[in-house]
């Protein structure tokens, strides 16, 4: 871990007002019911720790993109309800995140009380990292704990600005765990280290491919981005997704990997369809035989077998990005099969957040993965070797 940063273990909490920046950006359905509360559950260790210390817990988070104005469909009210159930105690819900009404609620708090503030992004000052807004937020607490890995790659008021006004700041248990796993895997992996990269576009993963390419023993490429690599080899890929301006990059990545003795795997067969509509005619074909006008939308069974065999001796596996258009059942088999293979591997298994976490969840394998990241964008930036502003803003430990 970036143990240079102070963590929740390094700051006195007893009797203090502790502001915890959480990531409660959870998916809601039409009737504003929470469809997946993983992010809420993953913050519980930090919240319970602060409650146990007899401190006052003031939670803040964003939800969705309300663009700096009040919008009831982005209210954190459903989160307050669910959190209360998970903690088994009352969670008071504030009508705003700064202002006189909030000050009053904070003043009334007793040790062990939990208060959740309304959506930070109802104020334009949050995303602008505005000094006045940061100061108003900071005035509510004595200690600041950042536990929002999913927002750590954003330089916002609640992740960066607030640290100017609260000197007692530290990383929470979840943030610490995320950094330990993701940085640890990249900096010091137990080998063989295999990276499985999928998703639609090569361009979205350039930094990850370049950073991991120097560190892994094997690279497995699937998803839409595989077709750019196949096209770069001169294969006909029909109407499959391709980034023409990435062909040279793709060629270079493979050549570079091979010159360093890194094993490089691409799909050998794929599921093709006459159109992208559910219910369209599909075939399974070797990648050399994709018909003109057809779309490659998933890896085929031979690729699943090849990739699974490549994972047999792995000791560290990092997976980011689905193997195909897995939101459509007809094209989900490749992604779900790879999820099973990773879950069955005798290795430290790490899954990047976002769609990949959803795929593991759908495969019913969440409990069999060593670590599932809660942050999509933040995980990618960390795997690219970038500094996360929300982490950089926290004070270092005394040497």
Image (cartoon, rainbow, N blue to C red):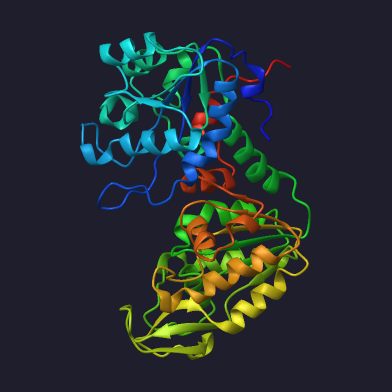
Q: What is the x, y in percent for residue 18?
A: 50, 17
Q: Nearer the viewer, residue 142 or 14?
A: 14
Q: Nearer the viewer, residue 130 or 227?
A: 130
Residue 79 can be seen in this image: yes
* Residue 106 placement: quadrant: top left
Q: What is the x, y in percent for residue 132?
A: 32, 14
* Residue 136 placement: quadrant: top left
Residue 6 can be seen in this image: no
Residue at (47%, 39%) from the top-left corner?
40
Q: Residue furthest front?
A: 88
Q: Quadrant of the N terminus?
A: top right
Q: Is residue 379 above or below residue 273?
A: above
239 to the left or right of 13: left
* Residue 83 placement: quadrant: top left
Q: What is the x, y in percent for residue 47?
A: 53, 28
Residue at (49%, 91%) from the top-left corner?
289
Q: Nearer the viewer, residue 166 or 93?
A: 93
Q: Nearer the viewer, residue 131 or 244?
A: 131
Tell how many labels.
0
Q: What is the x, y in percent for residue 320?
A: 55, 58
Residue at (39%, 84%) from the top-left corner?
238
125 to the left or right of 318: left
Q: Is residue 370 above or below residue 176?
A: below
Q: Is residue 385 above or below residue 204?
A: above
Q: Quadrant of the C terminus?
A: top right
Residue at (48%, 74%) from the top-left corner?
227
């Amino acid at each position: 871990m970036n143990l240079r940063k102070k963590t929740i273990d390094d700051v006195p909490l007893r009797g203090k007002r502790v502001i915890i920046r959480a990531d409660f950006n959870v998916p809601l359905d039409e009737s504003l019911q929470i469809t997946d509360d993983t992010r809420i559950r993953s913050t519980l260790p930090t919240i319970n720790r602060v409650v146990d210390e007899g401190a006052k817990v003031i939670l803040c988070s964003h939800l969705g993109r309300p663009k700096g104005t009040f919008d009831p469909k982005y209210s954190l009210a459903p989160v307050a309800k669910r959190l209360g159930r998970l903690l088994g105690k009352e969670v008071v819900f504030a009508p705003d995140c700064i202002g006189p009404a909030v000050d009053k609620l904070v003043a009334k708090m007793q040790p062990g009380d939990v208060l959740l503030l309304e959506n930070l992004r109802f104020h334009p000052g949050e995303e602008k990292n505005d000094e006045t807004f940061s100061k108003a937020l900071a005035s509510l607490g004595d200690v600041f704990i950042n536990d929002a890995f999913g927002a750590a790659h954003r330089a916002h008021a609640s992740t960066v600005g607030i640290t100017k006004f609260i000197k007692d700041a530290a990383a929470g248990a979840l943030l610490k765990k995320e950094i330990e796993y993701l940085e640890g895997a990249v900096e010091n992996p137990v080998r063989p280290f295999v990276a499985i990269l999928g998703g639609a576009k090569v361009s979205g993963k350039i930094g990850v491919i370049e950073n991991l390419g120097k560190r892994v023993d094997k690279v497995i490429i699937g998803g839409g981005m595989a077709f750019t690599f196949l096209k770069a080899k001169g294969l006909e890929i029909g109407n499959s997704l391709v980034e023409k301006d990435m062909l040279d990059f793709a060629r270079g990545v493979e050549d570079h990997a091979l010159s360093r003795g890194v094993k490089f795997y691409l799909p050998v067969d794929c599921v093709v369809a006459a159109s992208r509509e559910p219910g369209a005619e599909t075939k399974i074909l070797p990648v050399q035989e994709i018909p003109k006008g057809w779309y490659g939308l998933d890896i085929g069974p031979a690729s699943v077998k090849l990739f699974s065999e490549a994972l047999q001796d792995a000791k560290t596996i990092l997976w980011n990005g689905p193997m195909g258009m897995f939101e459509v059942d007809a094209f989900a088999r490749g992604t779900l099969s790879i999820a099973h293979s990773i879950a069955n591997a005798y290795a430290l298994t790490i899954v990047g957040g976002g769609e990949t976490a959803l795929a593991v969840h759908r495969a019913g394998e969440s409990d069999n993965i060593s670590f599932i990241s809660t942050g999509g964008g933040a995980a990618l930036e960390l795997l690219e070797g970038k500094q996360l502003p929300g982490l950089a803003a926290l004070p270092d430990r005394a040497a």
